[in-house]
Amino acid sequence: MVGTEQELAGYAVVFQPADPPRTSRVAFWDPSGNPLPLGVGDQVDLDLVVNEPTESRADDHGAPEQSGASDAASRSAQSGAGDVASRSGGGPWLRTVRAIEVPVADAVPVLGRMRRAAGAHPSAAFWGGAALVALQLVARGKLLPGVSPGGHDAWRVGPLDPDDITRLLTLAEAMPPSARALPLTTPPASASTPSTTSGPTSAGPTSRGSTPPGSGSVGSTSLDPEGAAAPALSSRLSELRLPVAEDLLRDFLDAVADGMPRSPAAAKAHRTDLFAARAPQRAEGLRGWADEVSVGLDTGVRISLRIELSDSLAFSAVVQLHSLKDPTLVRDADDVWSQDVPGFGPRARIDATLAIRRAARVWAPLGQLLDQPVPNGMSWADEEVADLLAGAAQRLAAAGVELHWPRSLGRALTARAAITSPNGPPKDMPGFFGGGASLDFSWQVALGDDPLTEAELDQLAEATRPVVRLRDQWMLIDPELARKARERILKPVTAIDALGVALTGTTEIDGQQIAVTPTRWLEDLRARIADPDRADEPIEAPAELHATLRDYQLRGLRWLARMTSLGLGGCLADDMGLGKTITLISLHLHRQQSADTAGPTLVVCPASLLGNWEREIQRFAPGTSVRRFHGTSRSLDDARDGFVLTTYGTLRRDAVRLADHRWGLVVADEAQHVKNPSSGTAKALRTVPAQARVALTGTPVENNLSELWAILDWTTPGLLGRLGSFRNQWATPIEADKDEEVAARLAKLVRPFLLRRKKSDPGIAPELPPKTETDQPVSLTREQVVLYEATVRELMAEVQASDRMARRGLIVKLLTGLKQICNHPAQYLKEGADARLAGRSGKLELLDELLETIVAEDGAVLVFTQYVAMARMLERHLAERGIPTQLLHGGTPVARREEMVDRFQAGESRVFLLSLKAAGTGLNLTRADHVVHYDRWWNPAVEDQATDRAYRIGQTRPVQVHRLIAEGTIEDRIAAMLAAKRELAEAVLSGGEAALTELSDTELADLVELRGGAR
């Protein structure tokens, strides 16, 4: 029925219940009497109660309403079906109209679109809103099976909670008369009424049979006794009744619900037509089962317990009954057993007994009620009350049995863990956090927000009953609260653990997350460091700095100064190209202003960045000494100030000498190099002591949260606990279980220690030109297709026949081989330097086209590949075509690297071939306005870092990024999954190739299968 809402615009709508509900129908008719559109539903005649044709009134939409029941009729049927009365000077008419009938399932989407349409009839708007409510209830799983009055299987909405019922009652009260204009009964045909067929009956409104297409009103009869037809109709006025608004609305909701679970495959999936097929199914034999399902859910009663406390402090409970149909109806069991209470029905006592029996299964003491002639109440011993407070009350509430405690009995006692410090804030904060200090940890019980005194805690601890007198009020106490008062001293916590608890506001005790109140000075410290990007501290750029810091860089300096002055350290994780180096140089100069923090700064970085660091220091802090601790003649003699630059390789080999030197600050640049805490490099870095530690990286988390642990456990030891505990407490719930609550707590914990700004953040780098990223699909050549299919066929057979350990190695071999085939057959076949390159690879041909255009437009380009062998092939191929290049890889000497960077930046070389791992970080190559990723890396963060060699502060031209992807291959599959964020893509993002080794044979085959893409 697509587009039907346009054809039916302005039409009035009535609903016709049927048995079973899913066979109900919705009728649309035009109050203006215009011809009905053909080809939409079934055209039928309906007898409706409408206002007198001569009486038109403006509805809320500004259109005259001619279809609603009269005001008198509306009033008579508002609370129940009633006679349609007439009135002098005009009244309701029984009018036969031409209408379009459609099944309720087809009508729902039409109504949903009509409800907000301009000029929608009030009845259409109402039923559209009702359709939305029905769909929302079904989406929430509010469905119950039942048997209709006619004995058919039928789903219905339920169970409804009090909010649902209130919403439905409000909606029913808003039902316009025109929405229920179809009467339950109509007068029999006679000479004075044009009707020739019987109308709807009390069993449910029904329409007349289909007739040839027509339009307008077939006939109408005034129901006004003073009118011409009044003598003939006055005796039959009492026979005409309109449906109750609430009942009609519930019928509609059930009709929508009854059809929703009945998909075409439902019957086959459940191996039965009952409650699955659309056709009516006889189910009379299931009525008892359906009634049993309903009891306690949306029919019958539920119980609650009103607890009373006598003057002698004895506890008793009174059983209360609540009507499930009308949640506002509540009576004591005594009343229901002694008399018939309106609204509860004849089964109230049986249903109450069943509810008590169900509750007794949850808490056994309630079984005593079943032994009483009238289960109206019982007395409780202190032990039973204690059991309720210890957890039984929560179990009963979960089972639908609420406990209502006396208002005079206070229940505001709460227990929190508290961190206290009797000696006040430490004078030496760095020494406090780094010297193994501890703080007191204990339970704190409070009445509201006011902690109890020691004497009151003692009184609570010594209580032998579940009630105790505190501050002129009887208080209810559970056994666990009393235990905490008795055993209130907990194990002391270390200084860094105390800070972590203050940041998250909770800690885990006996497997439960407990709220914690930190001591005042610790709370002040938490507030001071909670927002790393705050800018309210009076720290300005050092006078020795020969540069003007951007606003965000100054905020970064203030954050680093704040954290290092506390001895806490941090990770500056700004996007590549936002100036982490100059920020760190500013921090060094700032720390030299105080004797407590002055001292040399050790910078550990990849070898390719030594020259960049040295140039930046000489440029921005020309009076600061800088030396390299690198090469065979390295020395630390006289390194008492300034900067000392070294590499991760040198650190690993000479850790002892570096650890013996006094450092004011140690910096780990491109800190992702130590993301593996068990590596020799990471272990060596941890042996070098310093007053403060700072990590610099654009990607603090490349693969998993353990990498974040490795970085922050170095900058701020102990913050995240031991690695095993971190994985159990944080990493597994977040990565595997997607626990948002745990992720939020971890964010609170690490946020003060990690400052990350992106180029795309407002106000960070507004002068940066745009960046355009494009996936460039290429077809495989015939040679590549043959190699690809043969490799898949041979290695998949080996994978399927291998054991677990060998399987992983074979999968890595398969994935590597396929990626090399996509690059060039010569790379996969390991052909020599005389191998023919042209005409054998789709990627190489596209690269030739790109470079031809870029060079012709006086552009400069970076070409990244993860394979040095492929880079050498590209170098040879481009040289044969007369395009000069330079190649940087892991084996390039440091001096040669710096020379190549300078040549490229000066415009002397326009095509720079780079190894992704060796040149993907740290280099400043803003001369390039094009970046080509010749092959895909498993982690997009690595590609982004490489792109940022060109797209960084200092870039003045738009940057175009080209990712070459072999169509129909594993590269195409990975690119598509990354874009769609599907489940397998998440596995790739969280584990690279290692994650793919865990795929099943079927998943692996689907991943590597060649799908077209050949020429």
Image (cartoon, grey):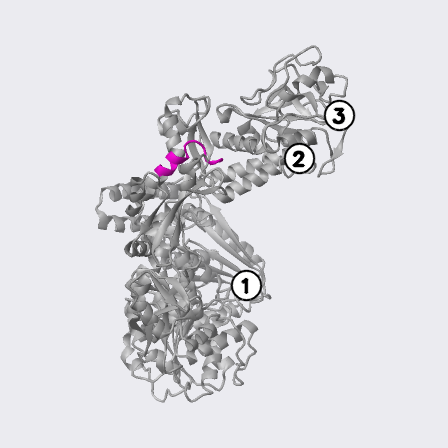
Q: Earlier in the sequence, mark 2 or mark 3?
A: 3
Q: Name the residue under label 3.
A: 53
Residue name at image x 45 percent, y 30 percent = 155
Q: Which of 958 and 934 is in front in this view?
A: 958
Q: In which quarter of the image is residue 376?
A: top left
Magenta span contains residue 348: yes
Give the magenta part as a residue range. Answer: 341-354
Q: Residue 761 carries which label?
A: 1
Tag 3 secondary structure: loop
Residue at image mark 2:
122
Quick one: label 3 or label 1, which is nearer the N terminus? 3
- Mark 2 vs mark 3: give the one in front: 3
The residue mark sitting in front, 3 or 1, is 3
Compared to residue 773, the image places residue 446 above or below, namely below
The percent position of residue 161, horizontal first and vertical second, equals 47, 42
* Residue in the picture at 61% in, 38% down: 173
Q: Is residue 974 at least partly visible in the picture? A: yes
- Could you say which quadrant of the image residue 277 lies in? top left
Task: Give left or right: position of 843 versus 127.
Answer: left
Q: Depth check: 119 or 986 in front?
A: 119
